[in-house]
Image (spheres, helix red, strand yellow):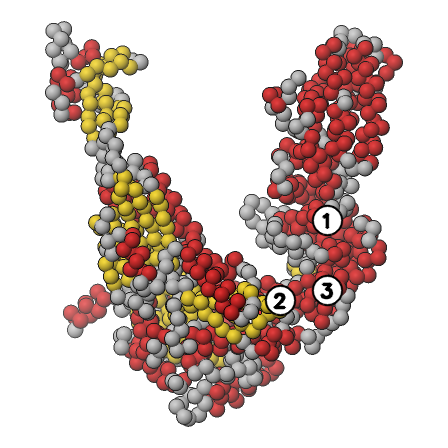
Amino acid sequence: MAEPASASTTAGASSAGSSELLLEVRCEEIPARMLEGATRELATRVFEELMGKGVGPREVETGFTPRRLVLVLKGLPARAKDVEEVVTGPPVTAAFGADGAPTKAALGFAQRLGLAPEALERVRTEKGEYVAGRRHIAGRTTAEILAEVLPHVLLGISWAKTMKWGSGVGPWVRPVHGVVALLDGEVVPIELFGVRAGRETVGHPTLSPAPFAVSGSDDYRAGLASRGIEVRFDVRCRRLAEEMAARAAAHGGQLVDDPGLLAKLGAICEIPGVMEGGFDRGLLELPREVLGTSLRDHQSAFTVERDGVMLPLFLTVMDRPDDPVGRVRAGNEWVVAARLADARFFWEEDRKVPLPERAAQLSHLTFHEKLGSYADKAARLAALARAVCEALGWREDVPAAETAAGLLKADLTTEMVKEFTSLQGAMGGIYAREEGHSEPVWQAIYDQYLPASVDDAVPRGRVGVACGLADRIDTLVGMFGLGLVPTGTKDPFGLRRAAQGILRILLENELPLALEPVVRAAAALYGDRLKRSADQIVADLRPFVADRIRYLLGRRELAYDEIEAALASGVEAADLTVSDLASRAKALHQVRGEQAFLAVVLAAKRIANITKGQPEHALDAAALGEPAERALHEEHGKLAGAIDAALGARDYAGALRAIGSLAEPLERFFAEVMVMADDPKVRQNRLALLQAIGRTLSRVARLTEMVVEKAEYRS
Amino acid sequence: MKSFQELILSLTQFWAGQGCVLQQPYDLEVGAGTMHPDTFLRVLGPEPWKVAYVQPSRRPADGRYGDNPFRLGKHYQFQVILKPAPDDVQALYVRSLEAMGLDLRVHDLRFEEDNWEAPTLGAWGVGWQVMLDGMEITQFTYFQQAGGLDLQPISAEITYGLERITMFLGLSRSIYDIEWVPGGPSYGQVRHQEEYELSKYYFELADVSFLQAQLDGWEREAKRCLAEKLVLPAYEGALKCSHLFNVLDARGAVSVTERVALMKRVRDLAVACAHEYVASRERLGFPLLPKAREEEAARG
């Protein structure tokens, strides 16, 4: 006898949700950088799994400290809904005998389902009529489901780095010491790495280590609050920010904003105490970049300013509410004094060797083993910065650009940059300023790594632009010249960021600089160091740069097809400039809603279809006989001047609108004229006319790339 | 305020109370307490092990001729290994701070992520730098791999920087001012001449070609010992190579490309020693395993 052929379910009675889960996992200190993501992952996955099992909560609250992950679910149903299952049994023909009495097969089926034979029903299926029985399945309790879901999700959290401990327990982020899992005050019997869930938690490890029992989330939060502990990360950050702002204001100053640092401080404490310290006023002679970086990188501390001048103060976190004997402050000040004494030592020592002398030392510093030293790079940069200035018509900036380019990397030999790598560039700029270099020169050195991210500013001034471009183009060409093209997620030399930096600088300054000639100049400056020819490098860079353009223009709210149409118009052209390309895409964006333009796009697609695979035909205007084709030819002839004028003024929207005047004659042409005429001469002449128009239509962008919904165009 | 030697005494007393073998410093130049065979080799394999010792640690390039109040070419570490790491190892560590005389109710103690890695030992671990009032006082690591081998059980390594802690507790402005003995000779009086002379030697005087030949020679010795399955002498050869490499580096005699190659040579020796050590202990039947102990007791 076959097993039930099919089963279907129907919903049973539903249950209202008012249950609450409190989950706390306690472990040794979790790295600050992982806490937020892990808590989110825990909440999301538990929520999804419970929804999938029919016991989704109404509210989800999360929290964390370095020592706890916390999840509170409210409005949980007590159990999943009951389910009624219809189980299909044998076919009716086999279930009942000639006398209408149930056969052995039917009786066996009823018995398996625990039903009386008379309770069997009949169902119709595609294969015929079958007997069936109903089975009632009680929904599982939420406690039962949680006991299954919670350990599974907790073990599955994807930590950036895991460890094992003890006899080889794990892997997890850190050793687990305690679990609270309470559903409406009742322990959910789960276990994590041998640690059983219970109802006891602990306070702060040194201030309130005694365990205490909790019954639910309110009780839990109140118990922790009475010990000064706050599990909500955003609340800790807000309290720290408010308290630090108040301390800064008490000194007549303002906190120097640093959201990344605030998030770090919020994640390394469970009691958000503010630690205020001071340092020797004499240290304020150090550049603020140095003070700020040392305090941030070494001490995770904020600095304070009044009217743009730094105060001898720092603010950071302590994982305790107060500093009863001043020992925390004394300790922090001692460390800061030592750190800043180091920084002052670097500042004094570094300035004993001026940048030009340092630039000479760069011959000992390898840029890349096959591409030579940083001294070699500096020589190339001076020439390349000159080439960029000349290409942009900035002749008067050439001397400053050459000076800046020659000194650009000199700060790599300073002790300060060896200690604080994040100060490279800025430090060179500061030393150049100290040495009396002109503003364009020191600013160019200072700004050379800008933009470091997509939202970062670009270098100030022409000299900065020329140096920023030259440095990145030199690196790109060198690496591509060795065949080191980034693949997948691998980009060890930061070439994508370099290309993006180049494009951002060009776009934001709307610079009419064609990249290809500069790339060729950069390749020539490498002499015989490169493995690949300038042509090969250009060919490899083209799609690489096009991808970065797609990304950057996409971020400027330009649509995919606008970018593709603009790229297709000139990505192969040696004198292409990215700002020109952006203007073309923007023009498409502006006019794409206009009816005449939509008509032209559709016509362009039609022309492309008709002329596809056709050789170039010569147009004999005199032989055009039909009025519609003569009208089209005439309109097209008038258009050339208007488009030339608009393109000359880089008024791409104007050019596209001018093209729009072809919409009507094109429509008439397609309505009245048979392109594929029987007479080959007539046919070829008409194709020639369309080919000429097709070329005109592509002068701003390849319109056939544009996506047009038929509904958009109301003819 | 605790003197340098009182700090050593209180840590020694505390960890002896936890059943650690009180070992002595290794009698070869090493860069860190981790390189002592009672750490690097003992964390391998299944045998339990608890040890505590002071290890003078030489970092020639960090020498400052005794001029810098915070930096030394040779400093002292107090090293603890607990294998397997007990469940309460972190709490034990906190108690060791109290044993030093710290009242943690008035300090800020935090554990910030800091994962330790020693490429020349093929070793890495996960853990923290322990921050007391904003100062790093200890490196706390759960070893995950050593000599390229996955570890099981896992050892906890606790490394206290003795000079730093003494200095910090007394808020001294210079390492050389701290008291070695209460009221008695200062750290500077005990060690300043050594710091100066070692810096002078490592930075200016060390004979590069002699040291290079030494390094080649010790590498050969280590390999010869490995071929004879004499793992401890082989490991001493590896330690010699490691130290010679550090001296050459401080002397400015190691180029970027040579550096990679030299580090690989040291690493290859350390990895080979690690593998050979586990094999040698296995041949001995892992004598420190509890079962083996019981059997021994039964026989006796």
**How far, Cα to Cα, is label 1 from label 2?**
31 Å
**Residue drawn at (80%, 13%), measured in percent from left and top?**
A629
**How far, Cα to Cα, is label 3 from label 1?**
20 Å
Apparent side of residue A340 relative to residue A20 in the rendered image (left or right) = right
Q: Is residue B283 something one can see in this rendering?
A: no
Q: How many numbered marks have been drawn onto this rendered protein structure?
A: 3
**Disc number for residue A442:** 3
Letter of the chain that mark 1 sits on in the rendering: A
Q: Which amino acid does label 1 sit on?
A: Asn
**Percent position of residue A694, x then y:** 75, 24
Q: What element carries label 2?
A: loop
**Percent position of residue B130, x then y:** 41, 69
**Disc number for residue A509:** 1
Q: Name the residue under label 2.
A: A307
Q: Is residue A121 something one can see in this rendering?
A: yes
| Image-quadrant location for residue A44 | top left
User: Are tags 3 and 1 found on a single chain?
Assistant: yes
**Residue drawn at (53%, 82%), measured in percent from left and top?**
B69
**Percent position of residue B179, x then y:** 43, 88
